[in-house]
């Protein structure tokens, strides 16, 4: 993070928490600002992997679930799986000046970059993890801030996942509202956004935007827990069923065409503290876990909202955070329909 951003963090009383990520005062106020549209977030909970070289596209095409050939004027969500079809990572991927960028959860970034490098072999591809001195990832939401972005790029975004570029500064419009920005260290856009006096928001608080949008990021706590369809990755365009082979492709395709997705991603509310990776239970299928918390964010002093991957048939008899069935989850509405299985 450059000096101008550090000044902004200090002015907003930011500090580094035990998890190594930035925190700002009044988490619930930050969450409200994200939802009401007046938020500027430093997304240090995410990192960037850059792949460059003449074989970068073909290499990624053989590794990820999405069709990398579609990454250009639009970004794409995509996933990276084991041979058994279990997700190791989920990404937002975009292209800039011939290189590909993968936005991924910080806690798995280094390991995923190392794994990708292992499979480069003789391909002409260079895999690099970008550091905070090279780039700055921001989340932006709010009419005033988005007007600044539109003026900087000289036109409004064409639609969800549209990519705009100006002087190597990238803006990506998000489904459900807001933008992801990848700015250079000396970007003039950063100063313009700071001048708008939006609420300073942490990665944790920004997470409510993705929960509302029904987008679950794979983190260290949820690695190798879900086939892409379980996390609704097929419903947000992160899986192509028309491209060639990639790790786990056989399992993913079989799951799709044989209609055996018993677990799906749902949005839920709960009145007790939970963490990503916590197991869930139901009287429908006693004495076994029926799912897992994929993402969670406190919204007030007594309520958290979450994305959970659970067996669909269990909602009728109830889904609980404990095997003793003490705290029941309330199913909330996602912005897209879940296909019947």
Image (cartoon, rainbow, N blue to C red):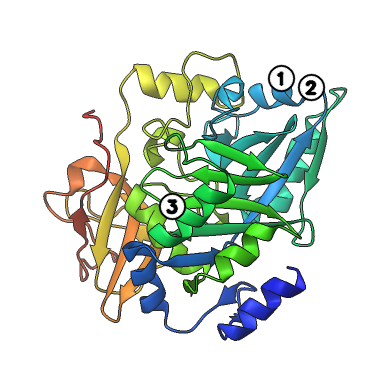
Front label number (3 vs 2): 3
The residue shown at (56%, 64%) is 193
Q: Quadrant of the C terminus?
A: top left
The percent position of residue 136, horizontal first and vertical second, equals 68, 58
Instruction: Tell me the distance, in whole angstroms, between the alpha carbons under discs 1 and 2.
Output: 5 Å
Marks 3 and 2 close (CB-CB < 8 Å): no
What residue does disc 3 label? 178
Instruction: Indicate the quadrant where residue 2 lies.
Output: bottom right
Question: Is 150 placed above or below 63 here?
Answer: below
The residue shown at (55%, 34%) is 75
Question: Is 254 placed above or below 144 here?
Answer: above
Task: Look at the numbered disc 1 and give the secondary structure of its residue.
Answer: helix
- Asked if residue 224 can be seen in this view, the reply is no
Q: Earlier in the sequence, mark 3 or mark 2?
A: 2
- Asked if residue 168 can be seen in this view, the reply is yes
Task: Report the disc number at residue 58.
Answer: 1
Mark 2 neighbour class, 10 Å CA radius: few under 14, some 14 to 19, many 20 or more: some
Foreground of the two, 46 or 174 = 174
Instruction: Tell me the distance, in whole angstroms, between the alpha carbons under discs 3 and 2.
Output: 32 Å
Task: Report the disc number at residue 55.
Answer: 2
Front label number (1 vs 3): 3
Q: Earlier in the sequence, mark 1 or mark 3?
A: 1
């Amino acid at each position: 993070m450059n000096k101008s951003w550090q000044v902004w963090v200090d002015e907003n009383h930011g500090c580094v928490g035990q998890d190594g990520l930035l925190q700002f005062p009044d988490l619930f106020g930050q969450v409200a600002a994200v939802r009401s549209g007046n938020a500027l977030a430093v997304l240090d909970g995410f990192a960037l992997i850059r792949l460059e070289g003449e074989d970068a596209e073909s290499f990624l095409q053989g590794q990820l679930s999405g069709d990398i050939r579609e990454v250009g004027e639009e970004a794409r969500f995509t996933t990276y799986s084991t041979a058994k079809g279990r997700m190791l990572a989920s990404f937002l991927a975009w292209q800039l000046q011939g290189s590909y960028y993968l936005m991924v959860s910080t806690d798995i970034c280094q390991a995923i970059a190392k794994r990708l490098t292992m499979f480069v072999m003789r391909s002409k591809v260079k895999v690099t993890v970008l550091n905070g001195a090279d780039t700055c990832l921001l989340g932006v939401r709010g009419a005033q801030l988005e007007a600044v972005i539109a003026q900087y790029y000289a036109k409004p975004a064409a639609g969800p996942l549209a990519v705009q570029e100006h002087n190597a500064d990238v803006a990506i419009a998000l489904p459900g509202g807001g933008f992801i920005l990848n700015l250079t260290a000396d970007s003039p856009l950063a100063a313009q956004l700071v001048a708008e006096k939006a609420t300073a928001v942490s990665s944790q608080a920004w997470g409510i935007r993705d929960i509302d949008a029904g987008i679950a990021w794979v983190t260290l706590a949820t690695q190798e827990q879900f086939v892409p369809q379980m996390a609704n990755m097929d419903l947000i365009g992160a899986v192509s069923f028309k491209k060639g082979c990639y790790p786990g492709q056989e399992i993913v395709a079989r799951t799709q065409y044989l209609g055996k997705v018993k677990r799906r991603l749902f949005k839920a509310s709960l009145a007790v503290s939970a963490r990503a990776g916590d197991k869930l239970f139901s009287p429908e299928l006693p004495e076994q876990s029926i799912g897992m918390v994929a993402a969670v964010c406190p919204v007030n002093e007594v309520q958290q909202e979450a994305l959970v991957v659970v067996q669909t048939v269990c909602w009728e008899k109830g889904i609980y955070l404990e095997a003793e069935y003490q705290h029941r989850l309330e199913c909330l509405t996602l912005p897209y329909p879940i296909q019947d299985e």
